[in-house]
Amino acid sequence: MRLFAAVVPPRECLDELEHAVDRLRGLPGADGIRWTERTGRHLILAFMGEVGEELLPELRTRLERAAHRTPAFTLRLHGGGRFGRRALRAGVAGDLETLRLLAERSDAAARRAGVPMEEHRRYRAHLTVGRARGEDVTLGAFVDGLEGFEGARWRVGELLLVRSDLPVSGVRGERPRYETVAAWPLEGREERSG
């Protein structure tokens, strides 16, 4: 099964983002972008790809441990940008240090459970809102359209393990399906300095 660890913004925050994206859909060239659906809007912490059933018990145990060690924290969706020439994203602001820590712990949990992970890269918080369908689509106006976006703050309180089923029918427009396999509360103590 194809899995990833993630954080999902609450419905209200996704509603705010959807209003901003609706405005983008009215811009010239918007038909050249494949917009992600609400169910596909999550902050991926560690993408694991295909994971064998035999690794699932150890993966669950290690992700639960990662969540147990990490405190709840606050984020908000903020602004926008792109990755390369094809991916349009919403930015993230707030306690990015704890978000990165949770991403690193999720990646380490998968590795220790025996999941063959890609090369480790520094985590960059984002939420993908669309992908250009072809090389001739430019994202500049869409990035500019998200520039002033400021979403409400929310408290991140759980780590999710999500299964992603890619389309197999070949029907144009079919989208991946997402299913939460497991969820764990963030239970770590907040560090106090001084």
Image (spheres, rainbow, N blue to C red):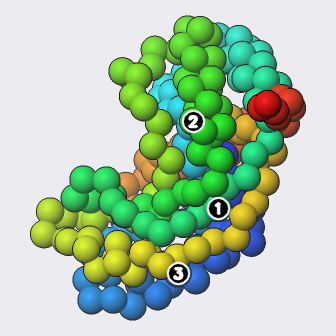
Residue 176 percent across, percent down from the top left: 51, 52
In terms of sequence position, does the residue under pointer 1 or pointer 3 come before the other?
3
Q: Residues within 10 Å of mark 3 (few under 14, many from 20)?
A: some
Report the disc number at residue 20. Answer: 3
CA gap between label 1 and label 3 equals: 14 Å
Q: Secondary structure at mark 1?
A: strand
Nearer the camera: disc 1 or disc 3:
1
Q: Quadrant of the C terminus?
A: top right
What residue sits 42% from the left and 31% below the top? 122
Report the disc number at residue 76. Answer: 1
Q: In the rendered structure, are the residues bearing label 1 and label 3 in contact, judged by CB atoms less than 8 Å apart?
A: no
Q: Is residue 59 above or below residue 126?
A: above
Q: Amino acid at mark 1?
A: Arg
Q: Amino acid at mark 3?
A: Ala
Q: Quadrant of residue 61?
A: top right
Q: Residues within 10 Å of mark 1 (few under 14, many from 20)?
A: some
Q: Residue furthest front?
A: 194
Q: Amino acid at mark 2?
A: Arg
CA gap between label 2 and label 3 equals: 26 Å
Nearer the camera: disc 2 or disc 3:
2
Q: Is residue 107 left or right of residue 160?
A: left
Residue 39 visible within the image: no
Residue 53 percent across, percent down from the top left: 64, 17
Q: In the rendered structure, are the residues bearing label 1 and label 2 in contact, judged by CB atoms less than 8 Å apart?
A: no
Report the disc number at residue 95. Answer: none
Nearer the observer, 186 or 14? 186
In terms of sequence position, does the residue under pointer 2 or pointer 3 come before the other?
3
Nearer the observer, 70 or 28? 70
Q: Which residue is mark 2?
A: 100
What residue sits 58% from the left and 74% below the top? 150
